[in-house]
Image (spheres, rainbow, N blue to C red):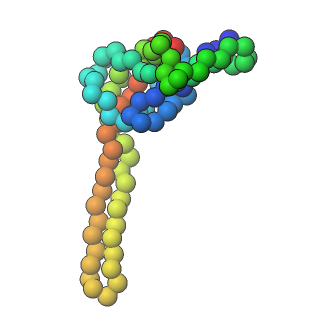
Amino acid sequence: MVMYTVVKTGGKQYLVKDGMELTVDLMDAEKGKKVELDVLLKFDDEGKTFELGTPFLKEKVAAEVIDNVLGEKIRIAKFKAKSRFRNVRGFRSKLTKLKIVKV
């Protein structure tokens, strides 16, 4: 029986289980540090147990920060016809890789 949880971090929700690696928005934690994530929902794959928080459960999910990385580059291009205006910029989001230690 595998336990799944829905956790919330950075204004987004993620479905996680034990040993899973997850990429989230940048967190204020260094490489190798332990962090705790808020749990919204907890259930198993067989459908026997189901816990729903209002809004959170008292339990927390333990995760370890693997690394802080940059995401893929996004190219932003602006163009106006007949005025010789071209503007190209790039953007790379800052992300944190987590490994779920304990659900």
Looking at the picture, does residue 12 appear above or below residue 44? below
At x 38%, y 34%, the residue is 10
Image coordinates for residue 40, horizontal then vertical, percent: 52, 24
> Number of numbered discs present?
0
Is 100 or 13 nearer to us in this picture? 13
Name of the residue lying farthest toward the bottom: 82
Quarter of the figure with residue 37: top left
User: How far from the left and from the top, in percent, is residue 96?
Assistant: 35, 31
Residue 38 vertical placement versus 74 (above, below)? above
| Between 41 and 18, the one nearer to me in the picture | 41
> Is residue 20 something one can see in this rendering?
no
Q: Residue at x 68, y 13 (%)?
A: 49
- The quadrant of the picture occupied by the N terminus is top right
In the rendered image, the vertical position of residue 8 relative to residue 102, given as above or below: below
Residue at image coords 36%, 42%: 71
Query: Residue 72 vs residue 48: left or right?
Result: left
Residue shown at the point (35%, 18%) measured from the top left: 35
Tell me if I can see residue 34 in this picture. Answer: yes
Percent position of residue 19, x then y: 51, 17
